[in-house]
């Protein structure tokens, strides 16, 4: 099937494919630029971007300027480029948003917590504001809050439990039938229609052209994909990381929680990633020298992170992910995240070949067929996710 374009805040993406933002350092300008050139939206992750871009350029840049640099580089050949900012990275959140808007990013896609205040940070000009949710209830809360700022989402990303990175579900709700992406979609679509009929972009476990077609036929307006773009030549993952994805089996991709992410959300990992293995035996002594996850203490100083004090329940996600992108590899072990379908990756492709495959132009054989969960659609529309976290606000 010929994939239809996606309309976003008055702009037209040739393909309804958004490359998911992937921190740390996996989706920087080389990946985003390549995706934008092929007619999708490339998305730069703002996580730890100041360190990564400063290292590449050999001059010290803050978050705001590093985002400016990456957006300009990614848009150099035309096409659409967005920024992914995680609510959980409280300290740098507002600078990331301002940097993205002032650099002319086409979208800010924001999750890992509810981006309730996003439109109030700065008027977004031409930048589309796109929250990431895992339930219709979360979308409703965001729409109601944003109404007070006179803004409605320009689109929403609905991310289901098969995604890579942090998951917006309680650990015991990840496998619920009602939380399968195909079951979350109908109520989220209804909610988007109720609040102005903006596009719904689905994410989590989408792997092939056929998967895209299935979700478009179910009513989605586009897809966001991470794992397939992680396994490309242009992604910023280290060679060791890409090799670990190629070696991964279905059994050694798991959701980590206790030990888990200090952001308080379940986090999908390759089980034998060195930092995860060490953290299961508490081999790494707590040490905080990056500070991206820090929360404010009672004095208003950014000083609190669970993994700073407790190496039994939390790993040091800043250092683990920076190491996966080739940063400080001599000092810190890498932590590899991937989507549940990562075991199907059998080749590192160029973005061009991947986009041709996703468009339906090329059929690339994979290690196995469609994820079993995607074979069972359409199903019900009911949904109830009550999720709360110690660290940040989650989908209610
Ligand atoms: C390596 C990796 C890093 C990710 N980092 C982030 C991130 O920093 N912020 C975010 O909102 N989502 C992140 N995600 C989620 C993706 O943007 C995307 O929504 C998700 O991976 C889609 O599921 P899929 O991997 O099955 O395609 C990450 C995913 C992967 C695989
Ligand atoms: S302890 Fe680690 S994860 Fe927490 S803020 Fe410091 S460097 Fe980041």
Image (spheres, rainbow, N blue to C red):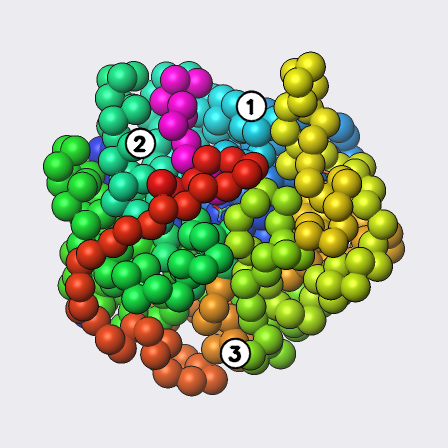
Q: Is 37 part of what is drawn in magenta?
A: no
Q: Earlier in the sequence, mark 3 or mark 2?
A: 2
Tell me the crowding category of disc 2: few under 14, some 14 to 19, or many 20 or more residues within 10 angstroms, Cα based.
Answer: many
**Is residue 239 found left or right of 281 in the rendered image?**
left
Q: Earlier in the sequence, mark 1 or mark 3?
A: 1
Q: Quadrant of the C terminus?
A: top left
Q: Is residue 393 left or right of residue 274?
A: left
Q: Residue at x 14, y 33 (%)?
A: 196
Q: Which residues are magenta?
A: 112-121
Residue named by callout 1? 95
Give the SS element for disc 2.
helix
- At x 55%, y 38%, the residue is 390
**Picture residue at 40% right of the left edge, 58% below the top:** 173
Dots 1, 3 in contact, CB < 8 A = no
Residue 115 left/right relative to 52: left
Crowd tier of the residue under label 1, counting other residues whose Cα lies within 10 Å: few below 14, some 14–19, many 20 or above = some
Image quadrant of residue 55? top right
**Residue underneath mark 3:** 250
* Location of residue 1 with respect to 79 vertically, above or below: below
């Amino acid at each position: 099937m010929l994939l239809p374009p996606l309309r976003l805040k008055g702009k037209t993406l040739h393909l309804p494919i958004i490359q998911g933002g992937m921190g740390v350092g996996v989706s920087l300008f080389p990946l985003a630029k390549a995706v934008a050139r092929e007619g999708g939206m490339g998305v730069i992750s703002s996580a730890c971007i100041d360190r990564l871009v400063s290292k590449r350029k050999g001059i010290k840049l803050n978050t705001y300027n590093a985002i400016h640099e990456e957006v300009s580089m990614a848009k150099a050949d035309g096409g659409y480029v967005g920024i992914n900012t995680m609510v959980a990275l409280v300290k740098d959140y507002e600078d990331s948003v301002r940097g993205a808007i002032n650099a002319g990013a086409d979208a800010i896609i924001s999750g890992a917590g509810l981006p309730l205040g996003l439109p109030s940070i700065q008027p977004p000009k031409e930048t589309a504001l796109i929250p990431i949710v895992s339930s219709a209830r979360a979308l409703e809360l965001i729409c109601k809050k944003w109404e007070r700022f006179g803004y409605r989402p320009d689109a929403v990303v609905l991310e289901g439990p098969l995604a890579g990175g942090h998951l917006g579900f309680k650990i015991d709700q990840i496998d619920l039938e009602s939380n399968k992406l195909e079951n979350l979609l109908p109520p989220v679509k209804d909610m988007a229609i109720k609040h102005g009929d903006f596009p719904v972009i689905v994410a989590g476990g989408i792997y092939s052209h056929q998967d895209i077609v299935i979700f478009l036929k179910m009513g989605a307006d586009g897809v966001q994909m991470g794992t397939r773009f992680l396994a490309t030549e242009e992604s910023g993952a280290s060679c060791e990381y890409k090799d670990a994805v190629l070696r991964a089996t279905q059994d050694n991709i798991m959701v980590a929680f206790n030990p888990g992410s200090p952001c308080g959300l379940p986090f999908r990992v390759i089980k034998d990633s060195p930092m995860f293995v060490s953290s299961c035996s508490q081999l790494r002594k707590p040490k905080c020298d990056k500070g991206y996850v820090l929360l404010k203490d009672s004095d208003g100083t950014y000083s609190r992170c669970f993994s700073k004090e407790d190496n039994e329940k939390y790993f040091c996600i800043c250092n683990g992910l920076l190491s996966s992108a080739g940063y400080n590899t001599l000092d810190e072990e890498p932590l590899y995240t991937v989507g549940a379908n990562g075991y199907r990756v059998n080749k590192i492709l160029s973005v061009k070949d991947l986009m041709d495959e996703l468009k339906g132009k090329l059929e690339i054989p994979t290690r196995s067929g469609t994820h079993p969960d995607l074979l069972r659609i359409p199903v019900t529309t009911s949904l109830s996710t009550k999720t709360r976290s110690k660290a940040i606000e989650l989908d209610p």
